[in-house]
Amino acid sequence: MATGLKRVLEDLGSTVLGAAALPDEGHTEVTGVHIYDPLDELLVAPGGLLLGVGVEGERRIAELLGELGERGAAGLVVKSLGVPGPALRERVRETGVALLGLTRAASWAQLAALLRSLLSEGEVGDTESEADLFAVANAVCALLDAPVTIEDRSSRVLAYSVRQEEADEFRVETILGRQVPERFVRLYEEMGFFRRLYQSREPLHLDVDGMLPRVAIAVRAGDEILGSLWAAVREPLSEQRKAAFSDAAKIVALHLLRQRAGADAQRRLRTDLLATVLAGGEQAAEAAARLDLATNRVCVLAAQLSGPAEGQNARAESERQRFCDALALHVGAIHPRAAAALVGGVAYAVLPLTGSRSRARQVAEDFLARVGGRHSANIGIGRLAGSITEIALSRADADRALRVLQARGTSGTAVDFRDVHFESLLLQLGDLAARQDQPPSGPYERLARHDREHGSDLMPTLAAYLEAFGNINEAAAAVQVHPNTFRYRLRRLCEIAGLDLGDHDARLAMMLQLKMYGSKS
């Protein structure tokens, strides 16, 4: 993807690269970076930027500008050029090739890494994106002469430079865990450092007892905070290095945006494909093949967060996605042909089973135990699917099992659909009655109406009686009244509702309606 030369100069900043002379046309597009080799043929693509390593003298620079002009190149970079004379400026105008100067403090390797990261912005799905981010960290390390880390908003280490051993033991601990230790995150929050960091557009110095000083700057895209850039330093940065640090944060921001775009595109694709598999139909087999998903002896897990993350705001959506990412990592470690995606607020996983069905429950319970400190959730487990056409049935089972757990108000529970089959049927029966506009009637409706109109508690009395299988003493204790009082209420509710508790069909009907509609209707 081409990037304008003006954009390159703005984003790299004057601490790395400067414009010695520009052609009259200011909209030159840069398509790539090339290294000059005096012993080889000059191969530069149209729009290419040539790094003139070792190129010196106005005569040789003028010759190269002519050769580059013939090839439609965008520019030539030479080191420590100074102010070009009139002849070179005229040569730039003639050839249309920009002449740029690399500052003496910067290296060619740094410039190449920064340019390639900048020019790759927008290339969705780049498999080398993480390696590129490490290259950027190394370039910044060389500019500042200090080990560097790039971190996200959660203080997770996305990339780090070489020379980390020159920092302190706490930085080494951070690198090994790819996460700033929780005790330091809390300390920085208590100090108000994160608040000041994300409000400032300049590097901030941080001194903590027993630790090498740090310099940090927020990495932002407009007003959005993407993360932060950190350097372990032995002395405050000079003004020149502060400027270089600020310029580097812009490059990191571009890279993180590109990385996020790639991850989002891949995630959307996997979500669409897995949703197609779960729905069944003509396209399911093709979608499964594209996912390299196992379709024989698999079962579907339906996992959903409970509690605050059930909302519809951006924070809740981000929490759900992190939860799903954790599930994908968990099942992927168990079987290479498993898959997981977030579909409609539920994290679904298709899990191949090589052993007994009990393995699915073990996997689900292990996952809930692992994430229990961060996420409160439930998991429904579907039937064992023997083919691609049965995966949709397994998904429906898992959904029903999950719904039963939600209706119970439980959390941190995994359940097989077979263990809650009857409860799920009652929920479906309630859905059918609601869709067909069939409200409760008969003795149940009469008793519920009496409770609403008179503020009585006859419905809970009936529920306690049925749940105790007619044991008066046990039922009375459940509603905390004297057995004689309970007997009176029982006779009274039978009169009001026209209910014969000696009829087992009538008892069954009331028990089903209590399960469907509850005892507080």
Image (spheres, helix red, strand yellow):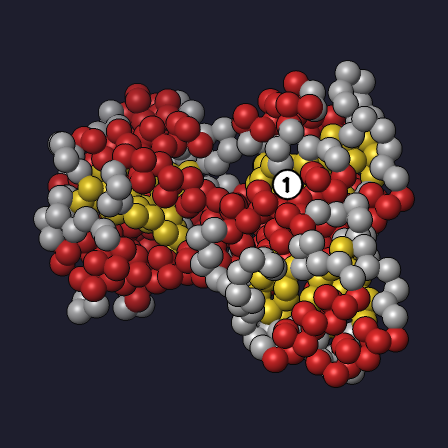
Quadrant in the picture for residue 115: bottom right
Q: Residue at x 42, y 56 (%)?
A: 267
Residue at horizontal 70 percent and vertical 43 percent from the top: 140
Q: Is residue 21 left or right of residue 288?
A: right
228 left or right of 370?
Answer: right
Which residue: 21% across, 68% down? 283
In the depicted view, which residue is nearer to us: 291 or 342?
291
Q: Secondary structure at mark 1?
A: helix
| Quarter occupied by the N terminus | bottom right
- Tell me if 9 is positioned left or right of 83 in this view: left
Label 1 sits on what residue type? Asn
Q: Position of residue 310 (x, y in %)?
A: 49, 48
Crowd around label 1: few <14 · some 14–19 · many ≥20 (10 Å):
many
The quadrant holding residue 441 is: bottom left
Q: Relative to residue 227, is residue 312 depicted above or below? A: below
- Which residue is under mark 1? 138
Q: Residue at x 76, y 68 (%)?
A: 59
Nearer the observer, 20 or 279: 20
Residue 220 visible to the viewer: no
- Where 191 sits versus 263, above or below? above
Front-most of 330 and 179? 179
